Structures are given as structure tokens and as C-alpha cells.
Image: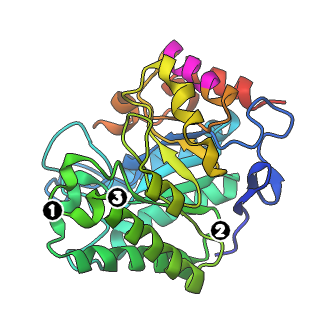
Amino acid sequence: MSARTRLEIGTDGWRINGDVTYAGAEAEGLLMNVRMVNATFEDSGRDDFDADANTDRFIAQIPDYRDHGIRAFTLCLQGGMPGYEGAINSAFEGDGSLRRDYLERVDRVIRASDEAGVAVILGFFYQRQMGIFTDPDDVRAAVVNGVRWIAENGYTNVAVEVANEYAHHGFVNHQIVKSDEGQVELVKLAKETADREAPGLLISTAGMGSGRLGESVAEACDFVIIHFNNTDMADVPERIAALKHLGKPIMCNEDTKVGNRGAEVASLCVENGCSWGLMHMKVNQHDPFAFDGAADDPAVYGRLKELTTP
């Protein structure tokens, strides 16, 4: 891959191709993002869903998302909740090896994002798909194989999110994912693999919707990922302030607040030095998936454009 977009962290915040993001704008140094985990969705139990066409519809709208201030998409190798239970949607086999047919769609999104100057926060594990693994060593193998795949393809616009909301009860049979100690181990494993095979690859993992993250986990990560789904607007500044002592970029990459409330919390996060990310569950994540650029939520994307324009 001839990469065009390089994601880095500088002393002044997030940088793309060496330049601080949104220079001169309110959101300078931040990485405004949107959760698009089902842009690469499949359900192997269904024959009425065209996975490639779904991915194509998303890719076609990448320029519009970018033009409204988005500089990162969150994807996941096990997708997200599609609005119904029982979907079989995983780029991993049970032994932690990778399914190349699934990865072809992920690759297309990463490359299209790279062309547009946009980063990808690539998640590995999602709670509803973890039944595919039976052994902690298979989970470890999945982490190593995921990082190696990023290295093999030469992506420079990708950062890793080891798990989505790692403390979620859906990970109950996988303490190596669910516990703080297990997350620290997996984050360190990803970083050790990256140091050997993908120098510069940034590694993190995501906390719950309360806007909190375990201290030991946050310390292990290159940047801090929190979610604000269940966080009252009034509590957002305190949640961000509680993590400032780490001296790392703080990113919310999942918030279900939409419309005017979404616009307000985006502004609040920027005011407090935190990147913000929309999760428009009913539009982008629940089947039938819709990807219509800024038309997904005019209030939110209008505000994001204001915050990211000098």
C-alpha cells in the first residue's frame, strides 16, 4: 500500500501527515470521529444481505463525512450491535486466525479513508461475537494476528482499539478481555507486536459508557478512549478532567446523543480538550444500515463543521 495519510500524536495533540489537526479551529489538535463499525458488516447466517454493497455505500460517503470535520472512523473486526441478536459477524476464526474475505472489506474502507486523509480506529473485539473463542490463547493470537495484518498492509492511518467496552458483561467468559489486568496484558501484547512489526502504531482500548477507564489500563494505552453513552452532559467535563493527569490525548469514540444534544456535547468535549465521536445507532449501526454523509444528522455534522473550520 502506498500510504497517503499518517496518524501520529504530537506534543500539541493529534497530527495527520505531520500537521496538527484543524489548525486554527476550536478543535485544533483533536480527532473528531464517527462510529461506523457496521460499514463492514456481514451475517454468515443470512443470505439476504449484500455485505459488499453495504461497504460500497459507506465508502461513497467518506468525502462528505470528511468535509464536515470527521478525521477518524471507528471500525471493528467483530462489528457492533446490528439491531437484532444472533448475527455471526467476525473477521476472526476461533483459533485467532483471520478471515481474508472479511478483511477485504475492511481493507477497502481503510484505503478509501487513507485517500481522503482520514484515520481509522480499528477495534478487534466486540462482546456479542466473543463466543467464537474458547481459550485465552486464541484471544492472544487474535491480537497478534490483527496487528500483523496492519503491518503487512503498511497502513499508516490506523490505530488499534483492542476491545469495545472491555468491562461489558458480554465478555464474562473471557476474563483476559473483561478484567483490567487482562486488558493491560492484551494492550501490552499489541504494543510489543507493533514495536517489532509496525513501529508507530498506536494502541488503546475502550472503556464503558460512563466516561471512565481503569487507571492501570489508561496508563498502558498510547491514548485514552472513553464512551459517553450513559454520561449526563453535566458530568462530561469532570470525566475528562479526571484523565488529564495522564498527559495523553483523550478521545470519546462512542456517544449516542444525537441532534441538538449531540451538537452540544460535541462542543462541550472540544471546550474541555477531548475528541468526540458520534454513534448514530438507529441510522449507521442498526440494520438496514444507512450512510448518507452529513444528512445522517444535520445538527451534529453542522456543529462538527463549525468546530473544525478555522
169 in relation to 133, above or below: above
Residue position marked by numbered label 1 in the rendering? 131
Residue 183 marker? none
Residue in the picture at 50% in, 17% down: 234
* First to last magenta residue range: 260-268
Quadrant assignment for the C terminus: top right
Residue in the picture at 43% in, 40% down: 212
Q: Please tell me whether mark 1 sits on a helix, a strand or a loop.
A: helix
Q: Please tell me whether mark 2 sits on a helix, a strand or a loop.
A: loop
Residue position marked by numbered label 2 in the rendering? 156
Query: Residue 294 is drawn in which quadrant?
Result: top right
Q: Is residue 175 left or right of residue 45?
A: right
Observer-side mark, 2 or 1, equals 1
Instruction: Work out whether mark 1 precedes mark 3 in sequence or the reverse, and give the earlier one.
Output: 1
Residue position marked by numbered label 3 in the rendering? 180
Q: Please tell me whether mark 3 sits on a helix, a strand or a loop.
A: helix
Query: Residue 264 is drawn in which quadrant?
Result: top right
Q: What x and y, as percent, mark residue 24?
A: 86, 34
Determine contact: label 3, label 2, CB under 8 Å.
no
